[in-house]
Image (cartoon, grey):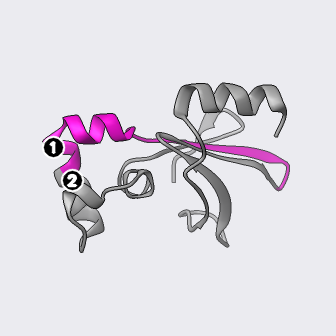
Amino acid sequence: MEANTLKAIETMFGSKVCTANLNIEGFNSPIGFDIYDGFAICEDYDGKQLIMQYPMMEAVRDSDEIASAILEYVGGIKKEEISPLHSLMTFNTLYVDGKEYIV
């Protein structure tokens, strides 16, 4: 990732939380994403850029409805254990080369 792009992402979403291989409906195998708070990116998947957006942790903390939906979807965790990855799992929009991907 270019330094300017990385700096812009970190300015908007903070430091990278983790890197994870995610199973996405419509794709044959797990895809490696860099996970931030509210944003995930795969720079190069077969020549395409994949981006996901989902609620940031501030929104999760401020909204009992969002937190409850995450707890129901993920299961087995407490509200204080919710992470950006849980938010991504529950609420996400995927963009492939800037266009929304709909299964």
Q: Are there few (<14), some (14-19), or many (20+) residues within 10 Å of tag 2? A: some
Direction from residue 66 to residue 20 in the image, left or right: right
- Quadrant showing the N terminus: top right
Q: Which residue is drawn at 56% across and 68% down?
A: 23
Estimate the x, y position of residue 36 in percent, counting from the top left: 55, 44
Which label was assigned to residue 20? none
Looking at the rendered structure, the kind of residue marked 1 is Glu
Q: Residue at x 73, y 34 (%)?
A: 6
Looking at the rendered structure, the kind of residue marked 2 is Ala
Q: Are there few (<14), some (14-19), or many (20+) residues within 10 Å of tag 1? A: few
Evaluate if marks 2 and 1 touch, with contact meaning CB atoms under 8 Å apart. Answer: yes
Q: Residue at x 66, y 32 (%)?
A: 98
In this view, 68 is above or below 21: above
Residue that carries the numbered disc 2 in the rendered image: 69
Q: Residue at x 63, y 34 (%)?
A: 99
Which label was assigned to residue 65? 1
Direction from residue 57 to residue 63 in the image, left or right: left
Estimate the x, y position of residue 71 in percent, counting from the top left: 22, 61
Q: What element carries label 2?
A: helix
Estimate the x, y position of residue 100 in percent, counting from the top left: 57, 37
In the foreground, 22 or 5: 5
**Residue stretch rendered in magenta on the structure:** 46-67
Which quadrant of the structure image shows residue 59?
top left
In the foreground, 7 or 53: 7
